Image: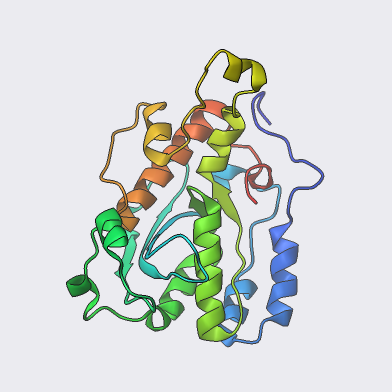
């Protein structure tokens, strides 16, 4: 392991063991197949990990009241982003579009009029996610909305390993302590666009699921190159 490869902590999650347990307890055959595909060993170097950037756009921020309206998936590794294998869906949400959400992600009522329901893409979604480590910017959103969506459609939630680029930035730029606040030092923004600027990455249109997935994949590549190492164990960064 190189000098700045982050070591594993004793409390790091062993997703391979968790998937074995989940495969045995899952009822839906699609979820069984997803978990049976397994997860990477906790000590696998990042350079050997199949990564999948994931972004969802939603009708709001509460997974119990709002719904997914689009999803973007983009497979990559530390050296290459496979844009030709990207997947993108606009889906018809169970909850109504609001004027605020339309302004946010620019998906309108006409866009979803003939779009599939989420249940119609679940098979393809789970196949694309199987065996991968998800990479997101703010894991709470993607995890909660996908978990809730599958609970509604399959009667069971969804668990999966995630590397959260927002959390990696938060670890580097802690909120100011009382002394820094006294000196009126403002917190460093860890939003996706602002985080990318610190690595001299280009600006993209925000709040398009596939573009944000690409932005997140590039951000992780830059974070690892700058602060970690290709041989950092995946268990040191995932949750």
Q: Identify the residue at horizontal 41%, vertical 76% (top origin).
A: 124
**In terms of depth relative to the viewer, which is nearer, 156 or 217?**
156
Where is residue 71? Give x, y as percent. 37, 64
Give me the residue at 39% from left, 79% from top: 94
Is residue 50 among the parts visible in the rendering? no
Say which quadrant the N terminus sits in: top right
Whether residue 137 is situated above or below residue 32 in the rendered picture: above
Q: Closest to the observer: 215 or 81?
A: 215
Give the quadrant of residue 110: bottom left
Name the side, left or right, on which 80 lies relative to 50: left
Q: Going by the image, does 43 lie left or right of 210? A: right
Residue extending furthest toward the left: 110
**Within the image, what quadrant is residue 172 found in?**
top right
Location of residue 202 with respect to 125 vertically, above or below: above
Give whichever of 13, 178 is nearer the camera: 178
**Whole-percent x and y of residue 99?**
26, 62
User: Horizontal placement of 207 versus 41: left or right?
Assistant: left
């Amino acid at each position: 392991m190189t000098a700045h490869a982050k070591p594993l902590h004793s409390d790091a999650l062993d997703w391979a063991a968790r998937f074995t347990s989940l495969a045995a307890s899952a009822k839906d055959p699609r979820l069984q197949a997803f978990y049976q595909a397994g997860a990477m060993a906790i000590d696998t170097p990042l350079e050997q990990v199949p990564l999948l950037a994931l972004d969802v756009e939603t009708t709001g921020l509460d997974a119990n009241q709002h719904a997914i309206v689009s999803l973007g998936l983009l497979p990559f590794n530390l050296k290459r982003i496979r844009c030709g294998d990207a997947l993108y869906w606009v889906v018809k949400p169970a909850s109504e579009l609001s004027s605020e959400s339309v302004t946010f992600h620019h998906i309108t009522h006409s866009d979803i009029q003939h779009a599939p329901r989420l249940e119609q893409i679940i098979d393809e979604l789970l196949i694309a996610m199987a065996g991968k480590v998800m990479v997101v910017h703010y894991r709470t959103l993607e995890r909660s909305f996908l978990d809730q969506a599958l609970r509604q459609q399959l009667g069971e939630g969804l668990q999966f390993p995630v590397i959260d680029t927002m959390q990696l930035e938060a670890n580097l730029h802690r909120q100011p302590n009382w002394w820094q606040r006294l000196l009126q030092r403002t917190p460093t923004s860890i939003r996706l666009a602002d985080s990318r600027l610190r690595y001299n990455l280009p600006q993209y249109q925000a709040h398009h699921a596939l573009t944000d997935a690409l932005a997140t994949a590039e951000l992780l590549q830059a974070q690892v190159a700058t602060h970690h190492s290709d041989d950092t164990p995946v268990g040191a960064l995932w949750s």
